[in-house]
Amino acid sequence: MNLVPFFISLMRGHWKLIATIILLALLSIQTLRVASLKSSLGAEKDGRLADRETYKRAQMEATANAFAAKIKKEAEDAKKADAADARYADLSGQYRAAVLRYQAAQRAAGKADLPQSPEGPASSDGPGGFAVVPTGSILIPQSDALICADNTARLEAVRDWALGIGG
């Protein structure tokens, strides 16, 4: 029981010293906390710097991969375009030959069956006109038929090429 009055008298006599010791202890604790926070902040900054480097490296790799894929795709498309051009040239030759064969057959048939001029005889209404073309027949100049053959060949080749792009 004498202990309580002893501590009270000790506090009254040395309160400045005790307050200074408590204050120094609190300052020491706070200094340790600040130092710990600074080291944590430094580690966090180093971690973010490493993350940024990783992101940059990953971005460069992704760019290189995308560029390689683009080059590969362009090479594939060029092969498909070359194949389409070859198909066009083949079809164009086939269609042009078909037009020329058809015209040669028409000339041969026209000479054998129609020895006279294509104009009809004069009638009582006036001079004769051109011969009547049978229904279902189309007469076009050879140059137009060859243009149609080229266009048809090109369109078929382009259609095949376009269908091949998606697959």
Image (spheres, rainbow, N blue to C red):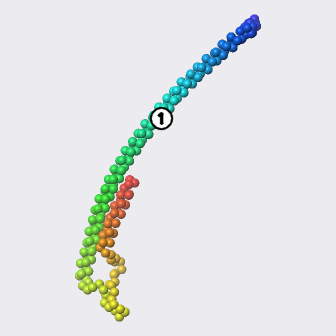
Q: Which residue is mark 1?
A: 52
> In front: 70, or 113?
70
- Residue at the (23%, 82%) spot, across then down: 112
Q: Tell me which corner region of the image, top left, top right, bottom left or bottom right, holds residue 5.
A: top right
Q: Tell me which corner region of the image, top left, top right, bottom left or bottom right, holds residue 30.
A: top right
Quarter holding the N terminus is top right
Q: Eyeballing the image, is 50 above or below 126?
A: above
Residue 4 appears in the figure: no
Residue at the limit of the structure toward the bottom, as seen here:
124
Give the image location of residue 94, x and y in percent: 27, 66
Disc 1 residue type? Arg
- Residue at the (36%, 56%) spot, across then down: 164
Judge the density around disc 1: few (<14), some (14-19), many (≥20) Cα neighbours within 10 Å.
Answer: few
Q: Tell me which corner region of the image, top left, top right, bottom left or bottom right, holds residue 56.
A: top left
Give the image location of residue 31, x and y in percent: 59, 20
Q: How many marks?
A: 1
Give the image location of residue 43, x and y in percent: 51, 27
Left or right for 44, reference 110:
right
Q: Eyeballing the image, is 29 above or below 153?
A: above
Give the image location of residue 143, x and y in percent: 30, 72
- Residue at the (40%, 44%) spot, across then down: 66
Residue 104 appears in the figure: yes
Dot 1 falls on a residue whose secondary structure is helix
Residue at the limit of the structure toward the top, as seen here:
2
